[in-house]
Amino acid sequence: MKLRFSRKHLCVPYAVFLALFVIAPIIIMLYYAFTDRNGAFTFMNFGKIFSDVSTISAILTSLSVAILTTALCLLIGYPVAYILARSGLKNSATLLLLFITPMWINFVLRLNALKEFFSLINLLDKSPYVNTVIGMVYDFLPFMILPLYTTLIKMDNSLVEASQDLGANKVTTFIHVILPLSMPGILSGITMVFMPTMTNYVISDILGRSQITILGKLIENHFMQSNWNMGAAISMFLLAAMFLFTWFTGGFKDDGENKARGSGLW
Amino acid sequence: MKKFVCLLLTAFLAATCFSALAACGKKDPASSKGGANTLRICNWEDYISEDETGKTLVEEFEEWYEAETGVDIKVEYSTFGTNEILYNNLKINPGIYDLVCPSDYMIQKMMSENMLETFGDLTEDVPNYAEYGSPYMKELFSANGWAEYAVPYMWGTMGFVYNPEKVSFAEASTWAAATNEKFKNKTTLKDSVRDTYFLGVGLAQIEELNAKSDLYYKNDGELSLEDYQKFLRDTFNDTTEETVKKVEGLLKKARANAFSLEVDEGKNDMATGKVWLNFAWSGDAVYAMDEAEESDTVLCYAVPKEGSNIWYDGWVMPKGANKQLAAAFVNFVSAPENACKNMDFIGYTSAIAGEEVYERIKDSDYACERGDEGAEAIDLTYFFGEINGSPAIVYCNEPNRQLLAQYPSEDITARCTIMEYFPDDDNERINAMWNRVKAGNVWLYVIIISAVVVVAAIAVVLVILAKKGVFDKKVKKGFTKVN
């Protein structure tokens, strides 16, 4: 047999890595999710997810934090990305860099600094929920701005000009042309913000003083209480939810990209 | 087809890795056990002395052992974060450690599950402990039948660190401090279910506990120390449904009152004044008071008058351990000289007594001279035994501070009891209760989600309407709109 090196083989390291550190752990988690303390097969863990107050509360907390954070990020991030990409500012790339640079500093450090600042302005001992949302927005804003910026800067300006030539005012142009064209950016921004905020409990621990229990924290709690089965079950549930969410927005994205090419505009 | 082959390949790889891992897990202890000159220790994080150069007692032990016996040994030292993690490690990989240092209730659990080796004759194997170990600790251990299996390392009480400018001693020395609305957002709870459950029981049974402690401290012999201790032990380790339910309600109240749930942060938050009351282990209390002194803040420590917890961490040898080396190490850290080093570095109180430790306490900054202003005599004979034929008295003019946290008086230990391990089912119920306490108000989140969804829906409708041209200007007379 002749072994020939082909381009396909370049993905072997990745496949090995994937199998070892992604697939194998998931298989182990699946085992724990479907067994009880004594190792017997059971569906009870998943039953408990929807019957226990602590899980339902954590799911709702995570959802509300994630939705609120994503909405705020979009509201704050869109105008910023729009101005950076389209108003012809000099050095807009440098400005963008200024928005992105904080991402390079470890976020735990930044959060602790933010905690001290909150304490300085007497916000820390107020609502842990509001603090958590502010922290999430602070941390994930760049993830919203960046995809929006890339979509907006790639947008063909002649389409906007055409719309204006045809007598559309600024609002109409925005709603009919710019917004549909920036849909791919909006969707990937939403995906990049919504999913991590569901589980990023470092933020709720530091700024919410551990008073807010989101799904990630609940999973940690179960593992710390050596209830691996329940922890694994919630993780699997979360994984499935994430998968569905990505699929859902991913389906939209294809649509959006078609739009970006100009079809479906009229 | 290609995709399918890829998938198959990955699945195959995963399967082989998985079985390889499983095989590793099984083989590991046996193969690494082979070295009779290797000692594998697992201890709490930051729980052993380190000198300025970063050299730990572990390295000193290696050198000492070689100097003593001429045998070159190697210590594999690792750390754990919670008792449960250590227990899980030992369950999954029996025999990976020769010596571990869990807490009271976990030692009892391991004992009951027959996971431990015995120490044998302490006077021969761990002579330092036999000679210098505190009579109080020895008594506690033999009375409970742990002496064969465990040698105590550190011990202490549980209580409240408080800021005397904001909180009085009377307010701090009761479990009710946790729910006192005067300190709203100025208290902390431990994000650790066993400790917080203890606090919860203290709150739930506060009246009965108070009545008994009054009876005991009246000192008229109506309630003997033995009976009082038994009452405390039964009360604080009560896991009946009724108690757990009561505890749940009270812990929810305490949580609403608390600034944070923490394990480590509390010490700093006390020093910076973010909180005034910190539910803490005595060793952490000493650390917090020392730290605060550096920024000229005075903090104090109080043990609830209704009764509290006395805890210890002890060295135990899991089944199949290298007993000889493990005992040698325990003996080494039990030498008064090394116990002092540990206490200096960690701030916790060693279970080792002896003259050297006593002299060090007497000469430390925490104590004062006999004639000093406000000096009060604290009798620690119960812990140190008699020193050169006279009682072990330490003078102190700063009541309720480091010295008390390190060495509670006999009056305080009388009202302290130990934690027992709970059976799995009880444990699960209590964990679930604690998770419920930590859960937020479900309806609040429902409202928030619905509000955001409604706003988003309105925005979408507006955009759609705008697209349909509802908001466009009316077409002037005589013109037609071209789409």
Image (spheres, rainbow, N blue to C red):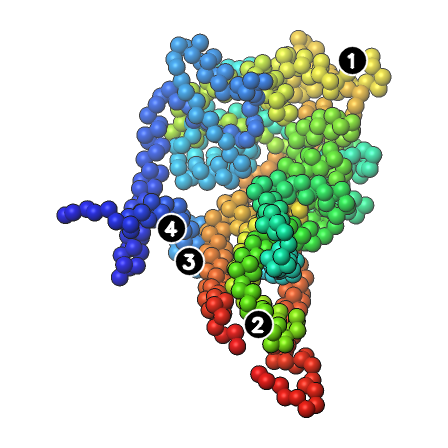
Indicate which disc, 4 or 3, sits on the residue closer to the N terminus.
4
Task: Return the residue at label 3.
Answer: A42
Task: Return the residue at label 1.
Answer: B369
Q: Secondary structure at mark 2?
A: helix
Residue type, numbered disc 1:
Glu
> Residue A204 at what x, y percent from top left?
63, 49
For label 3, the crowd category at 10 Å Cα-Cα, with few meaning under 14, some 14 to 19 and many 20 or more, is: few
The reply to whether discs 4 and 2 touch (Cβ–Cβ < 8 Å) is: no
Do tags 1 and 2 sit on the same chain?
Answer: no
Classify the position of the C terminus of chain B by image quarter: bottom right
Residue type, numbered disc 4:
Ile
- At horizontal 52% and vertical 74% (from top left) the residue drawn is A265
Indicate which disc, 3 or 2, sits on the residue closer to the N terminus.
3
- At horizontal 57% and vertical 72% (from top left) the residue drawn is A162
> Residue A224 at what x, y percent from top left?
53, 44
Q: Is residue A114 above or below residue B375?
A: below
Structural distance between the alpha carbons of marks 4 and 3: 22 Å
Do tags 4 and 1 sit on the same chain?
Answer: no
Structural distance between the alpha carbons of marks 4 and 1: 66 Å
Which callout, 3 or 2, points to the residue nearer the camera? 2
Q: Which mark is residue A162?
A: 2
> Residue B452 at what x, y percent from top left?
65, 65
Do tags 4 and 2 sit on the same chain?
Answer: yes
Q: Secondary structure at mark 1?
A: loop
Residue A72 appears in view: no
Classify the position of the N terminus of chain B by image quarter: bottom left
